[in-house]
Amino acid sequence: MPSDLETLNFYDTEAETYATWSKPAKPNKYLEALIKQLPSNGHVLDLGCGAGWASKAFQDAGFEVTAWDASAGLVAQVKRLHGINAVCSSFQDLDENAKFNGIWASYCLQHAAREHMPDILVRISKALKPNGILYIGVQRGPQTLRDVLGRLYCHYQPDEMRGLLTTAGMVDININLGSGKNYDGTPTDNLDLTCRKPG
């Protein structure tokens, strides 16, 4: 189950410019909420970490952080910008058992092929400690497409994500609807989801 090569090529090529664009202009309310729910000195996985702005925020909040991205270009930016050594690997290579108190997967899993999502969510669930918290951001909709930059996008509807997370063993699933803007300037409909692994 390899990562999508065309998507990876975009992020490798545009890594430095994307790093500047992707850093939020204001604090992220979902990240701040996750920080409040996690035990002090806990271990957080920033899955699909991009250029690492969230990894740095978790680190600054006192957590142990594992940053993880399949793009070698972005992994290099995490080191350059934040001094954090990120893991360069795909979602499907995640194979940890009850290691993390929290997992942050912000608008990255939508780049995985739709047929791979059930397996990825099972891997995420397995990697969480009991009562571990998961945040996922994905774009909302029924479609699978490539944007004008060649990136693969698999959009999801709320009920679809709820079903996938339930099947993966997650509970207390909360879904918020929102909107945003892509790197190419197009508007997005978003899903921000939080859930918990049972204790």
Image (cartoon, rainbow, N blue to C red):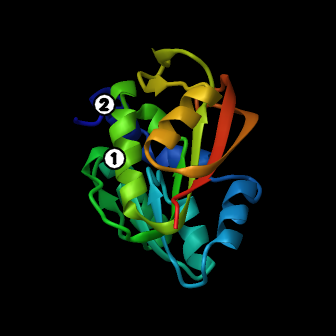
- Is 97 left, or right, of 16 in this rendering? left
Numbered circles on residues, count = 2
Asked which quadrant contains residue 58, the reply is bottom right
Image coordinates for residue 156, horizontal then vertical, percent: 56, 26
Quadrant position of residue 96: bottom left
On the image, the x and y values in percent for residue 174 come to: 69, 46
4 and 131: which is toward the camera: 131
Q: Nearer the viewer, residue 119 or 178?
A: 119
According to the picture, the residue beneath numbered tag 1 turns out to be 91
Residue receiving disc 2: 4
- Locate residue 82, reporting x and y percent: 49, 70
Tell me which numbered mark, 1 or 2, is placed earlier along the sequence. 2
Type of the residue with mark 1: Phe
Mark 1 crowd level (few <14, some 14–19, many ≥20, 10 Å Cα): many
136 vs 68, left or right, is right
Q: Is residue 62 above or below residue 102?
A: below
Closer to the eye: label 1 or 2: 1
28 to 107, vertically: above or below = below
Asked if disc 1 and disc 2 are in contact, CB closer than 8 Å, the reply is no
The alpha-carbon separation of the residues under discs 1 and 2 comes to: 11 Å
Q: In the image, is residue 169 above or below residue 1?
A: below
Q: Which residue corresponds to the image point at 41% horizontal and 44% vertical from the top-left?
A: 121
